[in-house]
Image: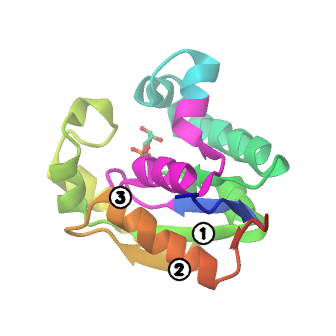
Amino acid sequence: MERTLYTLTQPVFLIGFMGAGKTTMARRLARECGLICADTDRCMERKYGMSAKELYEQAGEEGFRQMEAETLEEFVQGEPRIIACGGGIVMGERSREIIRTCGFAVYVHVTADESAERISNHDSRPFFHSMESVRSVNQVRVPLYEELADVTVDSSSRTSGRMAYEVKDILVKEGILCPVRK
Ligand code: S3P
């Protein structure tokens, strides 16, 4: 059976805390719909030749947020795509501005405790040295995710594959994801 291909009318940002499943969802959606996907962390890792956590530690919070904003700027200049954003991207003012003005933001909600359960290697992320730290970082960010969200989806007890289908339906209804006419 022939599958339907889609096109995006504007960039779609997947935002939310670490472990929400943004990267997997972006890949699934892109594969399912024939779209381009991009990931701020993976892009920066390729560009600078180190892991996102190493980059964060070397550049510091401010430097890292600046690199994220530059990466987002590049992404929104090209063909509209599904963009998986690093969990802390909302801490950068420039990135918030880009998300607010250049596309549609999907907040993939996950609690701090679920996030800690899902991330198998806590050493791979900053802030995971204690649960208090994870909870307090999440608490600061939740209002920022909420403020930017055009729509919120709840990832509790759902696989990233299922979430990708849910987001696909939302984007079609919003007129952002459109079937390509043959
Ligand atoms: C970070 C989240 C990570 C990555 C970096 C910092 C954060 O992205 O950008 O380690 O500050 O929350 P994921 O949300 O993809 O894990």
Image point (50%, 61%), residue name: 15
Q: Amino acid at mark 2?
A: Val
Upstream in the sequence, badge 3 or badge 1? 1
Residue bearing mark 3: 161
Would you place residue 35 above or below residue 174 in this image?
A: above
Residue 10: x percent and y percent?
A: 76, 65
Cα separation between marks 3 and 1? 19 Å
Q: Are marks 2 and 1 in contact (CB under 8 Å)?
A: yes
Magenta stretch in the rendered image: 15-43
- Residue 96 is tagged as none
Residue 33: x percent and y percent?
A: 59, 57
- Residue 151 is tagged as 2
Colouring mode (rainbow / by chain / secondary structure / one colour) = rainbow
Q: Amino acid at mark 3?
A: Gly
Most extreme residue toward the right is 77
Image point (52%, 58%), residue name: 1
Answer with left or right where residue 49 lies relative to residue 73.
left
Residue bearing mark 1: 105
